[in-house]
Amino acid sequence: MRVIRVLGTALLTLGLAAAPAAADSSPSPSASEENGAPTRAGTSFRTATEVEQGQTATARASTGDYLYWSFPADAGQRPTVRATVRLPESHAAETWQIDVYDGLRRRQACQYGAQTRTAGADTASVELECVLRTVRAWSEPWADDPLPGTYYVRLTALRVATADLGQPVGAELRVDSRDMGGAAAVDGALAQPLVPGIATPVGTDLAEDDDSPTAVLAGLEPEDGWASGWWSDRWLWTAAGGALAALAGVAGYRLTRGSGRPPGVPPHA
């Protein structure tokens, strides 16, 4: 019995020691798997990979490729697009650039940020940034203002040595927005946001025919829907202005009434 008890204790100890080891050896989910961020990029406008704001999309590519992503932006938002390119250990000087296009594929200018940067020889990475203008709810047809809808990001190398073409690189993309509030609001609104008619789902090949089963409507939109929020700080300014106007009217009335009495006449005569 004593031998059996000793063997049982030894087996129990081995089991407790093996459990943490098994837990440590199990693969942990990556950040992309946790938040559902895409891990590849498209190669054209039609195959642009959809990414939501606040996600960090990643992709593996080769130097010289064109990488495309798309994201939604609503009225009142000022999007900031940031991209990081991990370069190979050995390379010559390279110039990288990000361009942002709206739903009509019009190139949008950056307010500020390093949209184009040159990485020196053997530099490990290069970081790019483009802060767009505030998205307007409405604009004149001839204007080039950013409007609510889908926006496209294109990342590519402009000047690359022939020997560096085809070398593997890693790319990261993240889009964040700042809500500019009623200060950037305008009177009027679009009938529909500027979104593409079709988009190719991630993991499927682009069909030759737009009516094919793989062609679906673009599925990304802001969390609260397109321009669905009725609240704006313009309501605060409107209410404050109305209250001040009412107080000014009452004060003016009392001042006028008091100054209209003849001298020496009591107020309630």
Image (cartoon, helix red, strand yellow):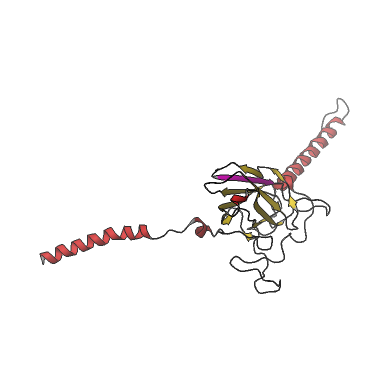
- 104 over 112 or under it: above or below: below
Q: Residue 209: horizontal and vertical position, in percent?
A: 71, 73
- The verdict on residue 50 being magenta is no
The answer to which of 235 and 252 lies nearer the viewer is 235
State the image coordinates of residue 146 (x, y, percent, origin top left).
Answer: 74, 51
Quadrant position of the C terminus in the picture? top right
* Left or right of residue 134, residue 23 in this image: left
Residue at position x 65%, y 63% from top?
Answer: 47
Point out the stretch of residues depicted in magenta.
Answer: 125-132
Q: Would you say residue 253 is visible in this rendering?
A: yes
> Does the magenta run of residues contain 130?
yes
- Residues 239 and 201: in front is 201
Name the quarter where the N terminus is drawn: bottom left
Q: Please identify the dominant SS of the magenta region.
A: strand
In the image, farthest residue toward the left: 2
Count how many numbered circles sit on residues in the image.
Answer: 0
Q: Quadrant of residue 154?
A: bottom right
Q: Is residue 239 visible?
A: no
Residue 99: percent from the left, percent from the top?
69, 50
Residue 229: x and y, percent?
68, 55
Which residue does the image show at 35% across and 59% down from the upper left? 23
Q: Quadrant of residue 218?
A: bottom right
